[in-house]
Image (cartoon, rainbow, N blue to C red):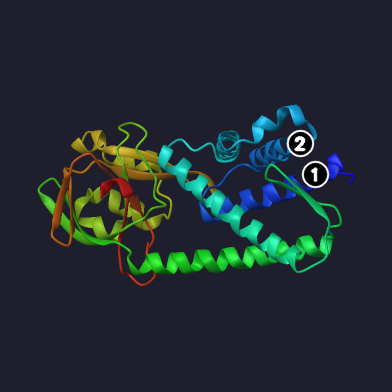
Amino acid sequence: MIVYAEYVFLENFIMNYLILSLTSKFGKAIPQKIKLVIASSVGALYAFIIFFPSLHFLFSFVMKFACSMLIIVIAFTPYRFKDFFRLLGIFYFITMVFGGAGFALFYFTNFNGVISNGIFYITNISIKNIIISCGIGYILINFCWGYIQKQLSKDKIFMKVKIKMNGEAVELVGMVDTGNSLIDPISNHPVMIVEFDAILNLLPLDTHKIFMTSKFPNFNDIATSINNTAWVTRLRVIPYEALGTENGMLVGFKPDGVVIEHESEIKNINDIIIAIYSKKLSKTGNYRALLHPDLI
């Protein structure tokens, strides 16, 4: 059987790019397109080892795992081990779903192919079969992911939060958000995002108007309004990225302390930064703060 190298590369590149794109979507990561292209190309080139028998030792479990790790690093460049392994797990989950969908489809259809050291090459695959298998894989992933998220949502962790500042305190309900990985770049303290309205009484009066009149308050205006006060040393700027926002900035401050209560457990935290969010975090109003996972 003749195996064409260009087809091996193209098929693997397309599937790698699709899997990495879905990993980005479900992992809440926003990589650059060029990084996805490079990572997909690396994965596609790895399949070329099938043409070099002397290099088949690279098909070992350790080398396959190392290649997948390299692909994740190239595509997403995660800076924390927790984010890295989360993306790697999602990458494997999506890969297995797509692989299962592809095998199931081709099992019930006529095809010729070869399997060598984990590389599955199909010779008479059609565009129609590729589209159908990708469609089935995508539907399965959405269904499985939606089911998992639904089950997890039943156990969403809501906690009572008390924020202390200059002898004042506000109490509110916060939700632990596994997608919140914000860290203060100066102190490396975890960041808790809180609605402006919920902590209004803790903030200097001169800053109220700034937050009320702008969805994205200007840091310089806030810094000027609290000049020559003790608040200057507490002020923070927290960079963030979100869908449609690559270089966002949240204004925050260092509180005197935060008390988090869940069931019978009470936790006092001093090493924390409060980021001020000018809009609503929950449409239903069930919670008014997003807690960093490291806080629990």
Q: Residue furthest top?
A: 54
Q: Secondary structure at mark 1?
A: helix
- Residue 25 in view of the camera: yes
Residue 48's tag is 2
Q: Are marks 2 and 1 in contact (CB under 8 Å)?
A: yes
- Image coordinates of residue 289 in percent, x first then y, are 30, 57
| Residue 43, position as x, y percentages in the image | 68, 39
Give the camera-side residue of 265 and 7: 7
* Residue identifier under label 1: 8
Spatial distance from mark 2 to mark 1, Cα to Cα?
Answer: 7 Å
Residue 120 falls left or right of residue 100: right
* Vertical position of residue 217 compared to residue 102: above or below: above
Which amino acid does the dot numbered 1 rest on?
Val
255 horizontally vs 25: left or right? left
- Residue 244 visible somewhere in the drawing: no
In the rendered image, residue 32, in percent from the top left (x then y), is placed at 62, 41
Residue under the image location 12 percent in, 52 percent down: 168
Structural crowding at the residue carrying mark 2, measured as other residues with C-alpha within 10 Å and reported as few (<14), some (14–19) or many (≥20): some
Q: Residues within 10 Å of mark 1 (few under 14, many from 20)?
A: many
Q: Residue at x 68, y 47 (%)?
A: 16
Q: Nearer the viewer, residue 76 or 168?
A: 76
Q: Amino acid at mark 2?
A: Phe
Q: Residue at x 78, y 31 (%)?
A: 52
To which quarter of the image does residue 182 belong?
top left
Secondary-structure class at tag 2: helix
